Amino acid sequence: MINRFSMMVRYVNGVLHLEDVDLSLLARKFGTPLYVYTENGIKERIRSLKKAFGSSLYLLAYAMKANSNLGILKIIKNEKCGAEVVSGGELYRAILAGINPKKIVFTGVGKTAEEIELAIKKGIFSIVCESDGELRVIEEVSKKLKKRARVMLRVNPDVSPNTHPYIATGLRNSKFGIPQERAYSLYKLMAESRFVEPIGIHFHIGSQITSPDPFYEASQKIRSLWMKLRDEGIKLKFIDAGGGIGIQYKDGESGLSPEAYASAIREGLKGVDAKIIIEPGRFIVGNNGILIGKVLYVKDNGAKRFLVTDIGMNDLIRPSLYNSYHRILPVIEKKGGSVNKYYDVVGPVCESGDFIARDRELPEINSGEFIAVLDAGAYGFSMASNYNSRPRPAEVIVKGKDYKILRKRENYRSLVKGEVF
């Protein structure tokens, strides 16, 4: 099933492979920590979403914040998708990768005037406005450029997505979006503006949502606003349902199928003559990336047994930030008779919060062996940092038996580039 873990990961003759590539070979050749992605897995996820929505889908705009590597973006572009960007830097990356500006949606609660100007100059599909103040700036910039801006308002439907509070964005107390009752008056203002063209409604209620119900409820609320605007003579063309479709991170956990996701949105918008836009990120790349690390030491302090690895929280912050779960496998498969033990899998960063897993049952693993942290394709490298002056990992992509480097490993010189002393 498409919603399950990537079927591209498996043991072949006792060695973990991604597609048909030996991960121990990549670890030895490129060093660790090392991010590895599967091209075919990414394409499979994109195509499954397009199939689920069918002709009702106008645009799939990949949420670049999940993973903005140019090599990944090239795949997105070749699959005829657009991009959802949240900064001028992401906009720059998307265009550099060849994504058509007319397929780019610019979201984000704190756009600067300079970013808005860049977006208008590039002729992107739409700016997503998040506040009264931002709308004024969009108008000012458009007037200066003598170029009308295409705008969607991000409406906050006040729906609980039942996810981690850090990634819930559609509640009334969230910093994101405009309350539905306020959105109506702003659409009236935009309809009268010479510098802003209102083209649709945008909503996004959160990330890693594994039930279709919140999508249905939010869509119903947006439908009510659409009908009210239509009755007032404000004719819009698009509804952007954002992203948030959840994936499976561990056994026994259910993700959300593309079919259930698409059905919830379509049913919630029943009777609305709108073209649908979606902004998936995690669903496309999450299960399709692996972080390989090396066990430096096995440490037993009497109370705990630790696997000390070269993967730091600067490389993968999700467990420390969200207490998130990632499956961990030895790259070399343990044969029958291997005794499982409980470990805290930790990194070298000088923080007690630097961990990948706590009290995790794993086969006995020794110093010098490689481990694979699975389902790390989303919010892995894109959230990586140089904390503790640690160079960021290399990134590699595989396709069938082939592989290529997408990003070279940083070195110590990389750490001080741009500094003046």
Image (cartoon, rainbow, N blue to C red):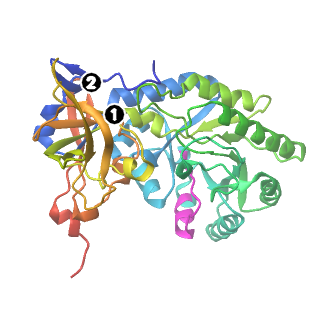
Quadrant of the rendered image containing residue 192: bottom right
Along the line of sight, which residue is nearer the eye, 228 or 80? 228
Q: Is residue 15 above or below residue 390?
A: above
**Residue that carries the numbered disc 2 in the rendered image:** 19
* Magenta highlight range: 104-119
Along the line of sight, which residue is nearer the eye, 159 or 288? 159
Q: CA distance from mark 1 to mark 2?
A: 18 Å
* Amino acid on which the number 2 mark rests in the picture: Glu
Q: Would residue 110 be counted in the magenta stretch?
A: yes
Residue extending furthest bottom?
Answer: 421
Q: Position of residue 213 (x, y in %)?
A: 67, 32
Q: Is residue 95 left or right of residue 243?
A: left
Q: Would residue 135 be counted in the magenta stretch?
A: no
Q: Is residue 111 above or below residue 73?
A: below
Quadrant of the rendered image containing residue 216: top right
- Density class for disc 1 (Cα within 10 Å; few <14, some 14-19, many ≥20) is some
- What residue is at 25 percent from the left and 54 percent from the top? 392
* Amino acid on which the number 1 mark rests in the picture: Arg
- What residue is at 38 percent from the left and 47 percent from the top? 319
Residue 343 in sight in this render: yes
Q: Is residue 116 above or below residue 342?
A: below
Q: Is residue 128 left or right of residue 80?
A: right
Q: Position of residue 67 (x, y in %)?
A: 39, 45
Q: Is residue 103 left or right of residue 367?
A: right
- Density class for disc 2 (Cα within 10 Å; few <14, some 14-19, many ≥20) is many
Q: Is residue 192 left or right of residue 242?
A: right
**Residue that carries the numbered disc 1 in the rendered image:** 327
Q: Position of residue 248 (x, y in %)?
A: 45, 30
**SS class of the residue under badge 1?**
loop
